[in-house]
Image (spheres, rainbow, N blue to C red):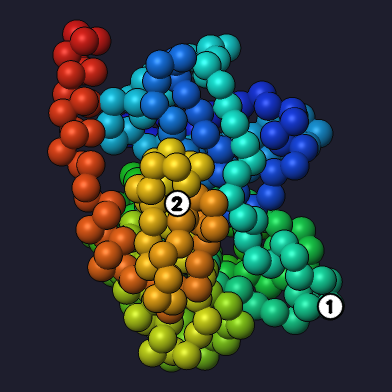
Amino acid sequence: MLTPTICRMKVSAPRLASSAQPGQFLIVRASENGERIPLTISDYSKEEGTVTIVTQQIGASTSVICGYEQGESFADVVGPLGVPSDFTEMSAEELAGKRYIFIAGGVGTAPVYPQVKWLHERGVAVDVIVGAKTKDLVIYKEEMEAVCDNLYLCTDDGSAGFKGLVTAMLEKLVTEDGKQYDQAVAIGPMIMMKFAVLTAKKLELPIIVSLNTLMVDGTGMCGACRVTVAGKTRFACVEGPEFNGYDVDFDEAMRRQGMYRSEEQEADHKCKIGRGR
């Protein structure tokens, strides 16, 4: 458990691990009749044949997953799915001299990690901003420090690092500290990514966002993750999850994200009663 409600687990899945790339996700089912849960791959080891996933306990199915003990198994694990991050297709010459800035919010720090690690292994300069409500909710601090040039922590209450929002830190780095970046990537809550894009626009900085929080079925069949990107309907699970931040209709995406919240909360309540809590 990284926090009381966020768990990290390493899953033995050799074939999946052998082809996983940054930006992709997998789907797990806790039981044969369980729902499909899309989870972004937060690390992978081709040598060990494992993938790492981070799950936040927010509903019935994620409560079951976070309750697993070492040695237990999912009914099935499918992946890797989704389109890998754009930079995985870039040549060494294209990456040379570039400087990236990643903005991570809450549990979104986990999917940021494999991207930063991939770039670091190829000698690309990377700074990372990690935001959380309080220091006790900061995850992947040590891991991120090992693979980035500079790590900037932001907490709402000032208990660790900079007191304030990740967007304020981004603006400070560029306008006050004179930092220059070629590309920004934001992963986290939808509202955070929306304002990260608005800040990046003010700074004239290209920005990519991940819409992994919209995904439900993970195959494009359910339509829950459809969103308007550059005026066209796109499906985050099969055409993303990463898109140009300037092209995303965030207001529509946030409305869609809230469609099933009441049903999920009711299911979680029944799940806890069934476990005697």
In the depicted structure, whether residue 249 falls above or below residue 32: below
| Residue at 69%, 67% in the rendered image | 87
Residue 94 position, x and y percent, is 78, 78
Q: Which label sits in the foreground, 2 or 1?
A: 2
| Residue at 21%, 47% in the rendered image | 259
Q: CA distance from mark 2 to mark 1?
A: 30 Å
In the depicted structure, whether residue 83 falls above or below residue 65: below
The quadrant in which residue 130 appears is bottom left
Q: Earlier in the sequence, mark 2 or mark 1?
A: 1
Judged from the image, the secondary structure of the residue bearing numbered disc 1 is helix
For residue 93, the mark is 1
The residue wearing badge 2 is 212
Q: Is residue 22 visible?
A: yes
| Residue at 63%, 61% in the rendered image | 85
In the drawing, does residue 246 fall left or right of residue 101?
A: left
Quadrant position of the N terminus in the picture:
top left
| Residue at 68%, 27% in the rendered image | 13
Q: Mark 2–mark 1 contact, CB under 8 Å?
A: no
In the drawing, does residue 130 fall left or right of residue 63?
A: right
In the depicted structure, whether residue 47 falls above or below residue 70: below
Q: Amino acid at mark 1?
A: Glu
Q: Amino acid at mark 2?
A: Asn
Residue 111 position, x and y percent, is 53, 50
Q: Residues within 10 Å of mark 1 (few under 14, many from 20)?
A: few
Quadrant position of the C terminus in the picture:
top left
Tally of numbered tags: 2
Judged from the image, the secondary structure of the residue bearing numbered disc 2 is helix
For residue 14, the mark is none
Residue 126 position, x and y percent, is 63, 69
Q: Is residue 107 visible?
A: no
